[in-house]
Image (tube, rainbow, N blue to C red):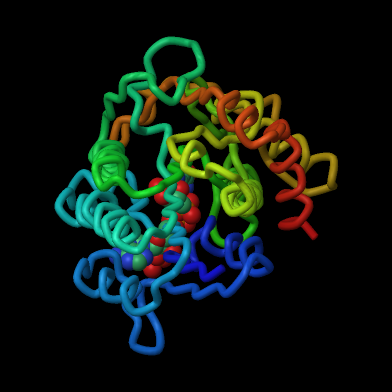
C-alpha cells in the first residue's frame, strides 16, 4: 500500500508517521515538501501534481489551518487550506480510485444543547475556522471520492505546546489562575487519533465492500470535561508528582466564556457521539483521563 501523508509535523501528523509506517510505503510531506514534491496545501496546483506523480492508494491529510483566532483575520488563506485543498485532494483521489482520510472538528457545530453531537446533526459553525473546515467536508463529499472524515476535538500531544503545559507553567508563575468552565468536550490525544486511523486503514483494505465504510465519524476520547476540569486534572497530577506550584487544583477559578473573550467564538458543547465509529470499526474509545495521564507522565519525566 502506498500512503501519502500531508502535514507530517503537526500534532496528529507526527503520530501518524509512527502509526502508518508499518502499513506500507509511506511518503510523508510537510509544507516545505521534498524531492520536488509539493506539500503546501496553499499551492493547489502543486498539491494536485504531487498526488498525480505519486499515485498513492491512500491520502491522509493531517495538514490544516488550525490557528482558530488568527483565521478570523485570514479567512481567504484558511479557506484555501481547510476547504479548497481537501477538495483538490478528494478530486485527485477520486480520479485515482484512492482513499482519502481527512480530519475535521467539533467546531463545525454551534455548541448548543447538552447532548452528544451525532455525525448527521446539522452543522452551524461559529467561526471562520469552523466554517472553512465544514466547507472542506462538503468539498470531499461532492467529489465522490471514497473518503473517511474523522471529526475530533481538543487535540493534544506531548510534543510541542499544549494546554496542559500552559496550565503547568501558569500555575507555577501566577498566584491566581482562571479557566473557562462552561465549554465541554473530551481532550483527545494525537496518539489515539493516529492509532485509530491506522486501524481504520487496515479495515478498509481488508473489507469485502470497503465503500460502505466511507463517511464521517466522530473520533474522540470517551467521557467529558470542561477546560477547568481538564486543568484541575493536570494540576492534581503535577501535585502528586511533586511539582512545585503556586496554584493548586482546588484553587483554580472557574470562569465563563464571556469572562475570557477571544476573536473566534468557541462551541460550548463539543460532546461528540462515538457509537458510529466504535460500532463500525469494532473499537472502544478509552476515557480521556488515560491519555492525558500518559502525556503528563511523558512531559514530566
Ligand atoms: P497542528 O496545528 O498541530 O498541525 C497542523 C499542521 O498543518 C502543521 O504541521 C502545519 O504546519 C500544517 N499546515 C498548515 N498550513 C499548511 C500548508 N499550507 N501546507 C501544508 N501544511 C500546512 O494540528 P493538529 O495536528 O492538532 O490537527 C490535525 C487535524 O485535526 C486538523 O485537520 C485539525 O483541523 C483537526 N482538529 C484539531 C483540533 C485541535 O485541537 N488541534 C481539534 C479538532 C480537530 P506548520 O507547522 O508549518 O504551520
Return the x and y of residue 43 as percentages of the image width and height: 22, 70
In the image, 177 versus 94, the foreground residue is 94
Indicate the quadrant where residue 18 lies.
bottom right
Q: Residue furthest left?
A: 76
Task: Please state, as top left, top right, bottom left or bottom right, where the C terminus lies in the image.
Answer: bottom right
Q: Nearer the viewer, residue 68 or 58?
A: 58
Q: Which residue is located at x 40 percent, y 89 percent?
A: 35
Residue 29's quadrant in the figure?
A: bottom left
Asked if residue 142 is positioned above or below residue 259 in the image, the reply reads below
Residue 271 lies, in percent from the top left, at 51, 23
Seen at 64% across and 56% down, the residue is 158
Residue at 19% across, 57% down: 77
Q: Residue furthest front?
A: 208
Q: Is residue 100 left or right of residue 279?
A: left
Of the four image quadrants, the one with ligand 1 is: bottom left
The residue sitting at 57% across, 74% down in the picture is 25
State the image coordinates of residue 162 (x, y, percent, origin top left): 55, 51
- In the depicted structure, whether residue 68 falls above or below residue 110: below
Q: Nearer the viewer, residue 12 or 45?
A: 45
Which quadrant does the N terminus fall into? Answer: bottom right
* Count of labels in the image: 0
Q: Nearer the viewer, residue 74 or 216?
A: 216
* Quarter location, residue 227: top right
Tell me if I can see residue 290 in this picture.
yes
Could one spot residue 153 in this view of the protein? Answer: no
Position of residue 293 measured from the top left corner of the image (x, y, whole percent): 75, 42
Amino acid at each position: 500500500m502506498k500512503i501519502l501523508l500531508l502535514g507530517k509535523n503537526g500534532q496528529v501528523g507526527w503520530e501518524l508517521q509512527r502509526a502508518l509506517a508499518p502499513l506500507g510505503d509511506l511518503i510523508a510531506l510537510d509544507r516545505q515538501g521534498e524531492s520536488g514534491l509539493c506539500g503546501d496545501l496553499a499551492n493547489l496546483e502543486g498539491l494536485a501534481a504531487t498526488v498525480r506523480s505519486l499515485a498513492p492508494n491512500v491520502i491522509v491529510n493531517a495538514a490544516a489551518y488550525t490557528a482558530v483566532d488568527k483565521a478570523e483575520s485570514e479567512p481567504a488563506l484558511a479557506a484555501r487550506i481547510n476547504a479548497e485543498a481537501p477538495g483538490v485532494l478528494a478530486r485527485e483521489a477520486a480520479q485515482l480510485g484512492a482513499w482519502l482520510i481527512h480530519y475535521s472538528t467539533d467546531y463545525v457545530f454551534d455548541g448548543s444543547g447538552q447532548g452528544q453531537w451525532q455525525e448527521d446533526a446539522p452543522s452551524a459553525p461559529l467561526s471562520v475556522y469552523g466554517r472553512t473546515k465544514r466547507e472542506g467536508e462538503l468539498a470531499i463529499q461532492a467529489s465522490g471520492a471514497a473518503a473517511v472524515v474523522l471529526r475530533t476535538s481538543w487535540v493534544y500531544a506531548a510534543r510541542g505546546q499544549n494546554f496542559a503545559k500552559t496550565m503547568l507553567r501558569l500555575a507555577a508563575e501566577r498566584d491566581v489562575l482562571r479557566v473557562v468552565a462552561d465549554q465541554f468536550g473530551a481532550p483527545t490525544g494525537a496518539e489515539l487519533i493516529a492509532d485509530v486511523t491506522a486501524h481504520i486503514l487496515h479495515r478498509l483494505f481488508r473489507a469485502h465492500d470497503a465503500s460502505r465504510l466511507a463517511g464521517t465519524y466522530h473520533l474522540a476520547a470517551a467521557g467529558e470535561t470542561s477546560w477547568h476540569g481538564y486543568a484541575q486534572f493536570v494540576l492534581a497530577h503535577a501535585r502528586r508528582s511533586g511539582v512545585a506550584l503556586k496554584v493548586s487544583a482546588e484553587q483554580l477559578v472557574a470562569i465563563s466564556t464571556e469572562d475570557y473573550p477571544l476573536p473566534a467564538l468557541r462551541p460550548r458543547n463539543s460532546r461528540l457521539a462515538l457509537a458510529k465509529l466504535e460500532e463500525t470499526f469494532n473499537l472502544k474509545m478509552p476515557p480521556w483521563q488515560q491519555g492525558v495521564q500518559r502525556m503528563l507522565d511523558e512531559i514530566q519525566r
